[in-house]
């Protein structure tokens, strides 16, 4: 039997052998850091320039006796640099000889991540800082991991953990370890940190408002991809004999999807700068309405657009 851990080890070795730059992130990274017990899925940040090599590797795996590679029928784009490099995700399943199904999600430009960093102790894994960025989703269940990763990062001496802490008392204590000359740069990235010195009594409320902004922005981001994909899929499925995912070899599956994406004009980069600005404006308004917050208060809390949606 190919266990999930054995499969991950084998796949990592294959990525290295193919010269593909990657970082394992999200749930499996949290398992590695000891803050999550298990997960069936794996999320991979792939250097955009290596997406073509990734596709070739998956074709080779599908042709082997060990694995079958198939697309999963959910919102996602072809495994091509032009799509994944602009924020799309490819959702695949790799089925081993024992019929175990391993789900893999591939990113070229990972959401909320500016720079891909690796764990210094295990270079195949994304750093705690990067994983915390990816866990700032619209799902409430992900946020305890953000807090846990911040605590681990602080314990390891990474002062940037102040960007991810979700507990007011913890932030106040962590702030004392930030050199005075560095504090303004951290406030630029996370404005609510300015309240530690001026109005620490408002910090708990500010953390709730900030999280709401993150969650609202991420819903908007997902919708920016989901809407065009649904339009594309509705057009595609009207084709005579439509069947997806098909039972073809993976290489043929790729060609079918790529042809359909071109024919029915699946947009390469649906999350435009205009939509980014609209998403932030909507999130600020929503937070103001829910928390009865003034524009001045929101200005003291809302992260800049380049942090929320890099």
Image: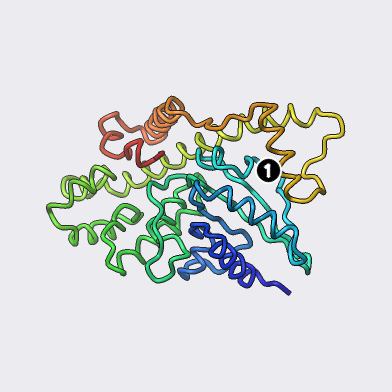
Residue at point 57%, 68% (across, down): 13
Q: Characterize the local packing of mark 1: few (<14), some (14-19) or many (20 or more) Cα atoms within 10 angstroms.
A: some
Q: Is residue 198 above or below residue 160?
A: above
Q: Is residue 79 above or below residue 54?
A: above
Q: Quadrant of the C terminus?
A: top left
Q: Quadrant of the N terminus?
A: bottom right
- Is 253 displayed left or right of 172 in the figure? right
Residue at point 70%, 72% (across, down): 2
Residue at point 50%, 47% (across, down): 49
Percent across and percent down for residue 301 are 30, 40
Q: Is residue 75 above or below residue 232?
A: below
Percent across and percent down for residue 33 are 45, 68
SS class of the residue under badge 1? Answer: loop
Q: Is residue 52 above or below residue 226?
A: below
- Is 240 displayed left or right of 138 in the figure? right
Give the quarter of the image for residue 256.
top right
């Amino acid at each position: 039997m190919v266990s999930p851990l054995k499969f991950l080890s084998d796949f990592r070795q294959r990525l290295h052998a193919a010269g593909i730059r990657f970082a394992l992130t999200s749930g499996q990274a949290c398992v590695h850091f000891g803050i999550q017990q298990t997960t069936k899925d794996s999320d991979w940040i792939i250097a955009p320039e290596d997406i073509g090599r990734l596709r070739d590797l998956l074709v080779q795996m599908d042709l082997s006796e060990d694995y079958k590679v198939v697309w999963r029928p959910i919102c996602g784009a072809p495994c091509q640099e032009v799509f994944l490099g602009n924020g799309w995700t490819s959702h695949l399943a790799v089925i081993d000889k024992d019929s175990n199904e391993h789900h893999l999600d591939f990113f070229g430009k990972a959401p909320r991540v500016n720079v891909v960093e690796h764990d210094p102790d295990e270079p195949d894994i994304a750093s705690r800082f990067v994983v915390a960025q990816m866990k700032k989703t619209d799902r409430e269940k992900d946020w305890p991991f953000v807090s846990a990763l911040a605590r681990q990062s602080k314990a390891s001496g990474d002062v940037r953990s102040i960007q991810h802490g979700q507990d007011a008392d913890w932030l106040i204590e962590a702030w004392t370890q930030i050199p005075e000359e560095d504090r303004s740069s951290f406030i630029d990235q996370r404005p609510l940190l300015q309240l530690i010195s001026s109005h620490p009594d408002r910090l708990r409320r500010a953390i709730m408002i900030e999280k709401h902004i993150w969650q609202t922005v991420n819903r908007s981001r997902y919708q920016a991809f989901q809407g065009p994909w649904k339009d594309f899929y509705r057009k595609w499925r009207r084709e005579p004999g439509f069947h997806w995912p098909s039972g073809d070899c993976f290489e043929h599956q790729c060609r079918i999807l790529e042809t359909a994406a071109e024919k029915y004009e699946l947009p390469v980069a649906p999350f435009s700068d205009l939509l980014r600005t609209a998403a932030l404006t909507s999130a600020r308004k929503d937070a103001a309405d829910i928390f009865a917050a003034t524009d001045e208060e929101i200005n003291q809390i809302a992260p800049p657009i380049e942090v929320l949606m890099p």
